């Protein structure tokens, strides 16, 4: 029996990753659900076969097909949390699906070491380039000859890299919520990681934009997982695990949600936390054979600096994604690269983007107050770091079980009203994603024009004025000097304007582009978060039928509805958090952009007035 599915979001395959490009509304045939890591194998109407993120599709009916098609994925439960009884889904399960499986995912979560101490002197941040070219083109060039997030050379929709996830646009950069792999180049991972790599382990060229199985596989928990594979499409992140759990985890950390003026909101701390990422230093080990860059992070709460390398940021991202990804969009880290990773411009730009990522995490009340995030910012010594790291990696309240820690301080929500708000927010994020892509496209074009043809036009005007001045000087006419001096000065003014035009994008457009690129990645995470909520609502809609057939009890139905209400509170709190930050961020960046534009044109006007004043009226 062939299992059909409908595509919910556009997905464009990354070259060399055995992925399949699909479009929203397209019907595909599932050929293998045992891939794991959030991916399935599917075939399109053209007969092409490849991997597709399972959260991007909705499973449909089964139809006769060739043997081997339509196998289902295993259904894990997390940690020591009691597994839900899914026996009532038997009626919907394929006959060939096994009832019990067991998976050992222990090899997929390597233990990383503690931060190393740099041994080389401070590497200062460079001055900005002023040669009229895109200042980031030096470090954006990738080994394949392309470039990543290079505003001057990459039109929107052509850039590559995991942080540019775009489930709606013409180009998708992979599963937005899928962890991209630890990025195990030799200089970024220390001996504990290197010892665990097999001869077939992946290197940086494979992991930075790794294949689908690697991207999903690095996400798994280091534990024996008991599987109850009795419902097609059920996965570790599926809402059933939470909705039907007999006994929820009892922990001390509860996440409060209360009703504010705009609706459900997270409980915010009295003082917002912040941190500063600064002072990159180049370090080495193994007698200089391995090098790395280490950053100083200073949180506002302690003002005590801790040291971290990129791999530690990567570890933090993985932990946050595992723990909160079902309820809170966790944007990807800035891209890694091999070639030129120690060049000054790259170090400066990566530090700036790490700062932006950390600032966004600090501004989220749930993420910033979490134990793993506080460990990253405030660990005391190597022992404290290692113990905290291992504790975080054994955390069992991950995936959809994060909802078990949420306590709304209000009555249950109306599921119909919540579903309407969910659809409205989904449409908004898609429309905003289109708008952000338009700004990025226009920004790319304007940056290229400002650093290319436009300065040359001003230079040609300035050179033409000076050439004509030289001709006037050769006339030998008395009283010529006043005019020729004024024309020469006007020509030089236009040459100065040309230089200003070439340098201006770094002063204003750069920040506008960075903000929109950051939101592009953040918006790419929302389909997964919304998808979890929609799947939970669909399960509750089936409750009446299941009660009628004695598959579940009335109490089970009530419990499921109450837990969906909790998930709805979390989704609406996250929606309101997003809107609040969006309004703040765009007010800030537009003010900065326009202030710099005003300075730019006022300076040009002053230079032109000065040139104008040197000409006399007869």
Image (cartoon, rainbow, N blue to C red):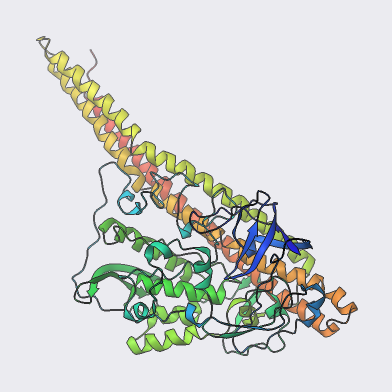
Along the line of sight, the residue nearer the viewer: 318 or 418: 318
List x then y, in percent, for residue 225.
60, 84
Q: Is residue 421 left or right of residue 294?
A: right
Task: Name the image quarter holding the C terminus.
Answer: top left
Q: Is residue 11 above or below residue 278?
A: above
- Compare residues 491 and 253 and report the one nearer the observer: 253
Placement of 471 over or under 439, stated as above or below: above
Quarter-of-image position of residue 78: bottom right
Q: Quadrant of residue 454?
A: top left
The residue at 25%/35% (across/down) is 496
Residue 176 appears in the rendering:
yes
In the rendered view, does 478 fall on the left or right side of 187?
left
Q: Residue furthest right?
A: 548
- The residue lying furthest to the front in this view is 67
- Nearest the eye: 561 or 71: 71
User: Total label count?
Assistant: 0
- Quadrant including the N terminus: bottom right
Classify residue 326 as left or right of residue 585. Answer: right
Give residue 285's position: percent from left, percent from top: 23, 76
Q: 428 or 321: nearer the eye?
A: 321
Q: Position of residue 450 (x, y in %)?
A: 36, 38
């Amino acid at each position: 029996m062939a299992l059909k599915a409908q595509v919910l979001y556009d997905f464009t395959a990354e070259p060399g990753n055995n992925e399949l490009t699909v479009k929203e509304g397209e019907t595909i045939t599932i050929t293998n659900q045992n891939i794991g890591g959030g991916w399935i194998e599917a075939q399109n109407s053209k007969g092409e076969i490849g991997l597709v993120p399972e959260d991007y599709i909705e499973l449909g009916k089964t139809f006769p097909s060739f043997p081997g098609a339509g196998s289902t994925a295993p259904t894990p439960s997390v940690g020591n949390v009691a597994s839900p009884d899914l026996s009532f889904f038997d009626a919907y399960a394929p006959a060939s699906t096994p009832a019990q499986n067991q998976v050992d995912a222990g090899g997929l979560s390597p233990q990383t070491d503690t931060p190393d101490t740099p041994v080389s002197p401070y590497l200062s941040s460079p001055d900005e380039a002023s040669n009229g070219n895109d200042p980031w083109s030096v470090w954006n060039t990738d080994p394949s000859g392309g470039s990543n997030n290079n505003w001057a050379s990459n039109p929107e929709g052509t850039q590559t890299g995991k942080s540019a996830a775009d489930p709606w646009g013409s180009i998708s950069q992979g599963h937005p919520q899928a962890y991209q792999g630890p990025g195990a180049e030799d200089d970024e991972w220390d001996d504990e990681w290197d010892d665990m790599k097999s001869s077939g382990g992946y290197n940086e060229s494979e992991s930075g934009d790794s294949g689908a199985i690697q991207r999903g596989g690095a996400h798994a928990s280091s534990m024996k997982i008991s599987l109850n594979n009795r419902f097609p499409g059920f996965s570790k992140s599926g809402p059933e695990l939470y909705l039907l759990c007999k006994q929820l985890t009892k922990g001390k950390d509860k996440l409060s949600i209360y009703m504010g003026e705009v609706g459900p909101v997270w409980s915010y701390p009295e003082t917002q936390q912040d941190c500063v990422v600064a002072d990159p230093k180049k370090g080495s080990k193994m007698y200089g054979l391995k090098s790395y860059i280490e950053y100083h992070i200073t949180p506002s709460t302690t003002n005590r600096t801790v040291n971290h390398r990129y791999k530690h940021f990567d570890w933090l991202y993985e932990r946050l994604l595992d723990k909160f990804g079902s309820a809170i969009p966790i944007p990807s880290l800035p891209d890694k690269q091999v070639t030129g990773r120690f060049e000054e411009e790259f170090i400066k730009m990566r530090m700036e983007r790490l700062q932006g990522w950390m600032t966004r995490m600090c501004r989220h009340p749930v993420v910033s107050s979490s134990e793993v995030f506080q460990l990253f910012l405030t660990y005391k010594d190597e022992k404290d770091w290692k113990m905290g790291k291992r504790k975080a990696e054994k955390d069992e309240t991950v995936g959809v079980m994060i909802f078990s820690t949420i306590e709304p301080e209000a009555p249950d929500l109306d599921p119909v009203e919540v579903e309407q708000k969910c659809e409205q927010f989904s449409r908004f994020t898609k429309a905003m994603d289109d708008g952000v892509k338009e700004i990025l496209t226009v920004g790319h074009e304007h940056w290229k024009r400002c650093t290319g043809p436009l300065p040359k036009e001003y230079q040609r005007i300035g050179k033409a004025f000076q050439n004509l001045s030289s001709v006037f000087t050769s006339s030998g006419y008395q009283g010529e000097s006043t005019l020729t001096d004024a024309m020469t000065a006007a020509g030089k003014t236009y040459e100065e304007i040309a230089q200003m035009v070439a340098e201006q994008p770094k002063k204003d457009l750069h920040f506008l582009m960075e903000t929109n690129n950051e939101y592009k990645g953040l918006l790419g995470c929302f389909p997964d978060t919304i998808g979890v909520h929609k799947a939970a609502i669909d399960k509750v809609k089936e409750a009446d039928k299941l009660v009628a057939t004695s598959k579940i009890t009335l109490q089970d139905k009530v419990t499921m509805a109450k837990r969906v209400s909790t998930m709805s509170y979390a989704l609406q709190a996250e929606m309101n958090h997003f809107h609040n930050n969006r309004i703040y961020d765009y007010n800030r960046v537009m003010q900065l952009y326009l202030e710099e534009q005003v300075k730019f044109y006022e300076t040009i006007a002053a230079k032109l007035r000065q040139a104008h004043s040197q000409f006399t009226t007869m």
